[in-house]
Image: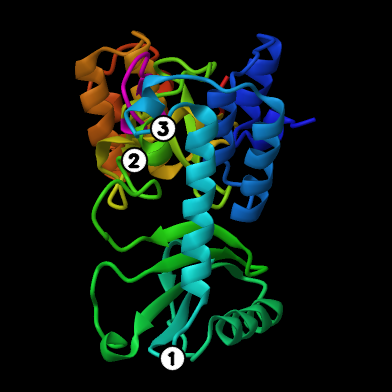
Amino acid sequence: MLDVYAFFNSEDVKDHCRKLNCIFTGRETAYIIWSSNRHTLHQKISAWEELLQTFPDEQHADFTNQNCSGLHQFLRNYIDRLRRFLTEFESNNGQNVYSYKKLYEVAPDRYLDESVLFSSYETCIATAAEEAVENHGIRAFLVQKRTIKDSCSERVEIPSICLTSQVQPMQIGVVPYCGGEDLLVPPFGFYGMWVDIPTPFKRGDIVCGIDAWGQKCGPVVVDTIPTSGEDYIDMCADVFELDFWGRVCRSEDYCPFSFEYYRGPLVGQDRLLFAIRNHLNGSLPLEELLRSHSVHTLEFLAKKRIGIMGWEENFEHLAGLAADAVTIN
């Protein structure tokens, strides 16, 4: 029996759906499997094949728009395209070379330290696997395939596959454009779907996202959760986050299906998120939010002046300035 809940990225969304006794259609189940950051491509293929055996066919505009009669044909086409890409990527006609970059636990936002070139995919991933055993700080690999003539090129569309630290294919990195509707690249395939998965989150919640490798990132403050749309992009929530310099930014890069409540203390500049939350839920007026931003940015100087700046009663608490760390109730 296919357990769709095993493919949820968020424990909070999973618990919410279970409490609602959600029953997912084949289309929704296929999407949840695709979106999982915890399963390899081969595990997803096995789950889709089980879905084909256990769920009835289903008609939807998502499939007819991609020249498929229904869910079953769409999934068979998708699995076939995915397998062909993996086979083609691993095959070498003597005109290709491979290399890999590493994603470290301490720098989870970019791949670093490109390897030497290898003449075969097998040798490349075998070397990567040995390195992962010796260095437990490696989180993942990005394997790239180039033709010999452009092995030193910086072309954008270099075919690539993201592997786990156990060198299992986890995601397709880059699929070179070959024309037509390729199911593996936006806006086609699952990228062209809107799926309404119930979530417990609302405006003002402080949450963390879950990245492509199942690791938590954030925290951020939810502004709006989408309630309708046409494709994957429309499913992204609007959030407020802090950039490297502590500036407040509005982002649309987070999918609420992968949110989890942030349960840790807010430390340093992150305390400003507490003030943003209180503004969004109506507890902190806009002018006080702007003043709190100045205080957080120039904390040392501002705190020395709080006694003479005439803050309203309870301002320090609502703005997240009453302590060096804020506990979210």
Residue 318 rendering spot, x and y as whole percentages: 40, 18
Disc 3 element: loop
Q: Which residue is mark 1?
A: 94
Rendered location of residue 6, percent (x, y) = 71, 35
Image side of residue 275 versus residue 71, left or right? left
Q: Which amino acid is tagged 1? A: Gly
Q: Is residue 15 left or right of residue 25?
A: right
Task: Residue at 54%, 24% (x, y): give it.
Answer: 28
Q: 286 above or below 304?
A: above
Q: CA distance from mark 2 to mark 1?
A: 32 Å
Q: Is residue 170 above or below residue 314?
A: below
Q: Is residue 229 magenta?
A: yes
Q: Marks 1/3: CA distance?
A: 36 Å
Q: Is residue 80 left or right of residue 309?
A: right
Looking at the picture, tell me which residue is in the foreground, 249 or 15: 15
Name the residue type under label 3. Answer: Cys
* Picture quarter with the C terminus: top right
The reply to whether discs 2 and 3 touch (Cβ–Cβ < 8 Å) is no
Q: Is residue 47 visible?
A: yes
Residue bearing the label numbered 3: 68
Task: Check if residue 38 falls in the magenta segment.
Answer: no
What amino acid does circle 2 point to? Phe
Q: Of callouts 1 and 3, which one flags the residue occurring earlier in the amino acid sequence?
A: 3
Please determine whether, in this image, residue 18 is positioned above or below residue 267: above
Kindly identify the residue that appears in the image at 43 percent across and 32 percent down: 255
Number of numbered markers: 3
Q: Which residue is mark 2?
A: 188
| Magenta segment boundaries in residue numbering | 221-233
